[in-house]
Image (tube, rainbow, N blue to C red):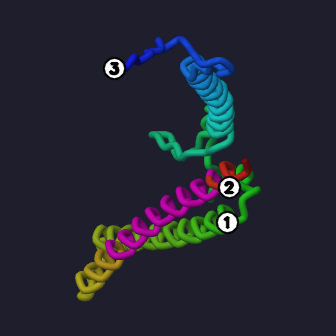
Amino acid sequence: MAIILKVFPKESYLPGEIKFSFGKYIMIFYLLIILIGFFCQQAYAQDENHKIEKYNKETIYLYSDFWGEGYVKNGQIMPLGRFARNLEKEIADSPSAIRQLQKARDYKKIAIITGTTATILGITDIILQLSNTKYSHKRSISIPLIGGGAILGTISKLYDQSYKGAISTAIWLYNRDVIRED
């Protein structure tokens, strides 16, 4: 007795069976995913371009050269002004930046006062050394004048560095607030 096996080719189906090919649908699915990804990427890129334009237009950074200090906003170099008064007008919308700017001004005032006092002490010493008057305590006055001038000059330089750091922090706080507005 022989067993007869009926082998159906791949394409033949039993009656009533529905032919369903996953190959076409998988290709359509992949194509849809690619198209959706492309359009989402375009929308995201446009949003990023808007953010970059806003960042370049509205943020500030410090600028310094031989002629003095300033800041750059929207590609234009602006002077800081005395005690950063011009900068204050630009960052007026950021309360945290204004508080930091006030600290910077306080540092600058101390730096100016100590620097001026150091200069006065140095000039006083020079005048005493150049004067033709002879008195015994001339040298004993010169050493404290030179020492005091050097100490006050160092303090002035340190406060000036603190001023620049506080100005930089104020600008950073302002830029952070500008970016947060989105």
Q: Which residue is mark 1?
A: 96
Q: Quadrant of the N terminus?
A: top left
| Kind of element beneath mark 3 | loop
Start and end of the magenta stretch?
A: 150-175
Q: Do labels 2 and 1 touch, CB within 8 Å?
A: yes
Q: Is residue 119 visible?
A: no
Residue 67 locus on image (x, y percent): 50, 40
Residue 49 locus on image (x, y percent): 64, 30
Q: Is residue 151 magenta?
A: yes
| Kind of element beneath mark 1 | helix
Give the CA separation, mark 2 to mark 3.
91 Å
Question: Does residue 115 sit above or below 7 in this rendering?
Answer: below
| Kind of element beneath mark 2 | helix
Out of 27 and 84, give the one closest to the viewer: 27
Q: Which residue is mark 2?
A: 177
Out of 9 and 83, give the one closest to the viewer: 9
Name the amino acid, label 1: Ser
Task: Name the magenta segment's main secondary structure.
Answer: helix
Q: Quadrant of residue 127?
A: bottom left
